[in-house]
């Protein structure tokens, strides 16, 4: 929102600085806060606020936390999709193969845009193949959606 007052802005409310940069909200994301501290020190001509060893540990910790958050986010999306599809058991759908390996064959429905595993009839399917599938089962707790090739 544009500043409408004739008075100058006081700076960022959470960082108490006039000049700053961020990719998200630094008051919510620790990696951005670390970056702000590094930039602030560099602009002021001060030494870095973190020794390289500590910065390396912080980076590893932040990456680990982000990976954990992404894993939870994926599970929630999969669980929601499985719950949403649970009333459509037996339904038939157009799909495209999104993954095919010894670990399993995966399809994404065209409508609704849901992904699941082909449990029956997956032989010979390859990524990019268009296929018609029947919904066999869902397990919202595990986030599983299982299909059979028709």
Image (cartoon, helix red, strand yellow):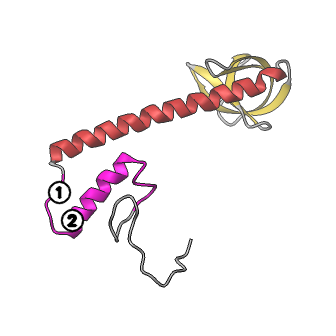
Q: Are marks 2 and 1 in contact (CB under 8 Å)?
A: yes
Expressed as whole percent of the image width and height from the top left, the position of residue 112 reads: 78, 36
Q: Which residue is nearer to you in this view: 135 or 12?
A: 12
Q: Is residue 100 left or right of residue 82?
A: left
Q: Nearer the viewer, residue 65 or 2?
A: 2
Q: How many marks?
A: 2
The residue located at (21%, 65%) in the rendering is 42
Q: Residues within 10 Å of mark 1 (few under 14, many from 20)?
A: some
Q: On the image, numbered disc 2 is attached to which residue?
A: 42
Viewport quadrant of the C terminus = top right
- Give the quadrant of the N terminus: bottom right
Residue at position x 42%, y 75% from top?
Answer: 9
Alpha-carbon span between mark 2 and mark 1: 7 Å
Q: Which residues are magenta?
A: 22-49
Q: Secondary structure at mark 1?
A: loop
In the picture of the structure, the residue carrying the numbered disc 1 is 48
Q: Nearer the viewer, residue 90 or 100?
A: 90
Residue at left offset 49%, top offset 35%? 70
């Amino acid at each position: 929102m544009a500043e409408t007052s004739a008075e100058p802005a006081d700076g960022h409310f959470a960082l108490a600085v006039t000049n700053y940069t961020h990719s998200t909200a630094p008051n919510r994301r620790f990696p951005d806060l670390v970056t702000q501290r590094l930039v602030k020190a560099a602009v002021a001509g001060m030494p870095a606020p973190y020794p390289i060893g500590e910065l390396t540990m912080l980076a590893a910790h932040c990456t680990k936390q982000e990976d954990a958050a992404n894993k939870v986010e994926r599970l929630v999306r999969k669980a929601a999709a499985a719950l949403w599809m649970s009333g459509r058991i037996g339904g038939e759908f157009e799909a495209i193969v999104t993954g095919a390996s010894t670990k399993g064959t995966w399809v994404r429905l065209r409508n609704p845009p849901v992904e699941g595993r082909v449990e029956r009839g997956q032989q010979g399917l390859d990524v990019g193949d268009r296929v018609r599938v029947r919904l066999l089962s869902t397990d919202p707790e595990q986030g599983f959606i299982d299909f059979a090739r028709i």
